[in-house]
Image: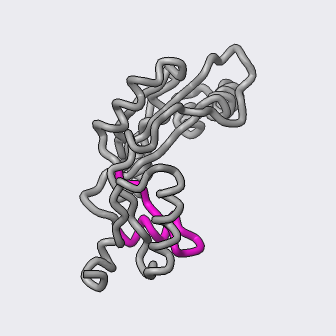
Amino acid sequence: MNNWLIKIGYEQVVHTEETDRRKIRQQTYISSWCIAASDFDLMWKAYIRNPPGIAIKSSVRRLQSVCDKAIDCWPLDLTLITYYDQAGGENIISSDRLTRFCYKDNHFHLDNEIRIIHWPNILLPSPDYVDLPVALDDVIVSVVMSPGADDKHMIEIKTMMDKLHLGDIPLEYSRDDRAVAD
């Protein structure tokens, strides 16, 4: 944004724009999800620092239903990320609060991301977090164990799920381990 403003001759607004963008980022809450037919190695490497870990599998329909039901949390949007070529000179011109959170550089296209985006009343101080009321069994289709998880880890996660009354939700091995587990 700064480079674009300078390029079109608006150097004087760079500082104001930076301040506004920082403020909006601090007042916006995002839950990111990957859209993929199955889990993949890049995801595990990016998000699991100390294996084993889990991934929650849901569906766009279930996420949309959560957003539709959370009336007390509106404004709340479910939006697919658009990837663009920043290095190639493409710019995002966002005139509204939401648009700026709907784009990522092509470098991240493997994320295949969809986001739940919430921005509370901008006139009030922003809370550190926002609770999105949701029944977990309304969101979760299955829970997937990270590659390399063994039966001990599977039992620990299954026990935890049972304690949370989520025992009817399938617990699966990662696609990398399914052939071994069968």
Quadrant of the frame with the N terminus = top right
| Relative side of 176 to 6, left or right | left
- Residue 162 in sight: yes
- Residue 91 in sight: no
| Relative side of 52 to 78, left or right | right
The answer to which quarter of the image holds residue 56 is: bottom left
Comparing 85 with 35, the one in front is 35
Q: Position of residue 50 (x, y in %)?
A: 59, 74
**In the picture shown, does residue 10 fall above or below 3?**
above
Residue at image position (38%, 72%) is 41
Quadrant of the frame with the C terminus = bottom left
| Relative side of 95 to 140, left or right | right
Comparing 64 with 111, the one in front is 64
Q: Position of residue 88 (x, y in %)?
A: 38, 50
Comparing 150 with 42, the one in front is 150
Residue at image position (68%, 29%) is 23
Q: Position of residue 119 (x, y in %)?
A: 57, 25
**In the picture shown, does residue 121 fall above or below 47?**
above
Magenta stretch bounds:
40-57
**In the picture shown, does residue 143 fall above or below 78?**
below
Q: Residue furthest top?
A: 123
Residue at image position (53%, 55%) is 163
The answer to which quarter of the image holds residue 130 is: top right
Query: Is 47 inside the magenta-drawn segment?
Result: yes
Query: What count of labels does the image hold?
Result: 0
**In the picture shown, does residue 7 fall above or below 182?**
above
Query: Is 141 inside the magenta-drawn segment?
Result: no
